[in-house]
Image: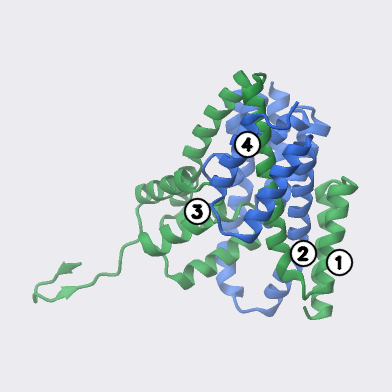
Chain colours: A green, B blue
């Protein structure tokens, strides 16, 4: 807020974040986001920094989910682009992945050194089993909204069979199943 | 080394463009390429690295970074990250403008609804493959089932259940 000559308070349109602010914002997010960054992303962008309104955030997230790539990765690119063009997008993306990359490489070094040590192996086995459990519940939660859509269930099952059981390559599987699923969804009016 | 980096670039750039519905959907293909086609890692190592990436902060595609590092060190990190995050980010940038224009078109909703079951099928496939690779003792199966049930039914923070799984694993109960 600034004060103009007439002494009246002027609420200036909040200038968008700078390239540096985008980098720092997403750097903090990358450090916070354990096991799924999305809830914290919304908090940071909408409530804390107020870079976007709630409606703008939802709209942008819709786009990011629709496109290939991680939702939050895409969101960082979209937010960066929106405010500061390509430099902003690069700053936001690098901010988001810098800290987790460094931490992971540290963990990877420890893994390479201690993977043969029995307690470490036992701990990793437990960690991997828990990570598998998280994936199962993610799949269950994502499948729940399909209950009322028989056509969707058929395509989800076909995709599961092709990839997990028959071990078919992803590209041809998607090229066949995705258009068919879109067509069937349209015809069935789901 | 150069050939490895080129393969890393090609594999992850392709996965980047195929990752509809987020990172978990491409896990099966990543495992197929990295373990079965290239033999860079064993199935066990892939699962371990995936678990480490889940336990570390950040978006859930970070497994790419650690695979790049494992396969080819720092150049591997750079190449795998650029290949994984670059192409999908460029697509996002290009589509951002068009998106506003087609916001209210009905076909957009149909396309979105039609892609959902594919995404669900892919995530379910990831869950099965990672479970098969990580559960090789009854005690580990118990951890997986408990975590799945607890995180499905409650809103507990994922980090707690990962820490719990690691602790139970560390105790060595039921493991050879």
* Labels 2 and 3 in the same subunit: no
Cα separation, mark 2 vs mark 4, equals 35 Å
Q: Secondary structure at mark 3?
A: helix
Tell me the mark number nearer the camera, choosing from 3 and 4.
4
Q: Secondary structure at mark 4?
A: helix
For marks 2 and 4, the one nearer the N-term is 2
Which residue occupies the foreground of this view, B104 or B67? B67
Q: Is there CB contact under 8 Å for labels 1 and 3? A: no
- Is residue B170 shown above or below B127? above
Label 4 neighbourhood size at 10 Å, few (<14), some (14-19), many (20+)? many
Q: Is there CB contact under 8 Å for labels 2 and 1? A: yes
Instruction: Report which quarter residue B48 is drawn in.
Output: top right
Label 1 neighbourhood size at 10 Å, few (<14), some (14-19), many (20+)? some
Tell me the mark number nearer the camera, choosing from 2 and 3.
2
Quickly name the residue at label 2.
B117
Where residue A141 appears, x then y in whole percent? Answer: 68, 62
Q: Which numbered circle lies on residue B168?
A: 4
Q: Callout 2: residue from which chain?
A: B
Q: Is there CB contact under 8 Å for labels 2 and 4? A: no
Tell me the mark number nearer the camera, choosing from 1 and 4.
4
Q: Secondary structure at mark 2?
A: helix
Where residue A85 appears, x then y in whole percent? Answer: 45, 55
The residue positioned 59% from the left and 46% from the top of the image is B161
* Labels 3 and 4 in the same subunit: no
Instruction: Report which quarter residue B6 is drawn in.
Output: top right
Asked whether residue A66 appears in the rendered view, the answer is yes
Cα separation, mark 2 vs mark 1, equals 8 Å
Cα separation, mark 2 vs mark 3, equals 26 Å
Quickly name the residue at label 3.
A76
Q: Which numbered circle lies on residue A154?
A: 1
């Amino acid at each position: 807020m600034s004060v103009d000559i007439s002494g009246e308070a002027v609420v200036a349109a909040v200038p968008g974040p700078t390239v540096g602010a985008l980098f720092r914002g997403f750097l903090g997010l990358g450090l916070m986001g354990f096991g799924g960054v999305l809830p914290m992303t919304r908090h940071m962008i909408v409530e804390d920094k107020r870079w976007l309104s709630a409606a703008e955030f939802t709209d942008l997230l819709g786009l990011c989910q629709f496109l290939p790539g991680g939702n939050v990765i895409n969101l960082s690119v979209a937010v960066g682009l929106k405010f500061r063009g390509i430099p902003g997008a690069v700053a936001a993306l690098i901010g988001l992945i810098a800290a987790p990359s460094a931490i992971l490489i540290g963990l990877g070094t420890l893994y390479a050194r201690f993977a043969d040590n029995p307690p470490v192996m036992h701990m990793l086995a437990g960690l991997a089993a828990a990570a598998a459990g998280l994936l199962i519940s993610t799949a269950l939660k994502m499948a729940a909204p399909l209950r009322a859509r028989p056509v969707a269930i058929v395509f989800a099952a076909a995709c599961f069979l092709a990839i997990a059981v028959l071990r078919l390559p992803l590209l041809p599987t998607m090229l066949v199943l995705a258009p068919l699923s879109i067509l069937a969804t349209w015809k069935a009016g789901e | 080394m150069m050939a490895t980096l080129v393969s890393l670039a090609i594999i992850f750039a392709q996965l980047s463009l195929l990752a509809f519905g987020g990172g978990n959907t491409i896990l099966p293909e990543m495992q197929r390429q990295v373990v079965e086609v290239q033999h860079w890692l064993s199935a066990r190592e892939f699962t371990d690295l995936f678990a480490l990436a889940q336990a570390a902060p950040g978006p859930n595609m970070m497994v790419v970074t650690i695979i790049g590092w494992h396969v080819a060190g720092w150049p591997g990190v750079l190449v795998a990250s650029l290949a994984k995050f670059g192409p999908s980010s460029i697509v996002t940038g290009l589509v951002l403008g068009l998106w506003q224009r087609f916001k209210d078109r009905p076909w957009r909703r149909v396309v979105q609804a039609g892609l959902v079951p594919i995404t669900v099928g892919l995530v379910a496939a990831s869950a099965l493959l990672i479970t098969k690779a990580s559960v090789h003792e009854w005690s580990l199966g118990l951890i997986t089932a408990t975590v799945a049930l607890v995180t499905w039914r409650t809103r507990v923070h994922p980090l707690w259940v990962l820490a719990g799984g690691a602790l139970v694993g560390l105790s060595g109960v039921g493991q050879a």
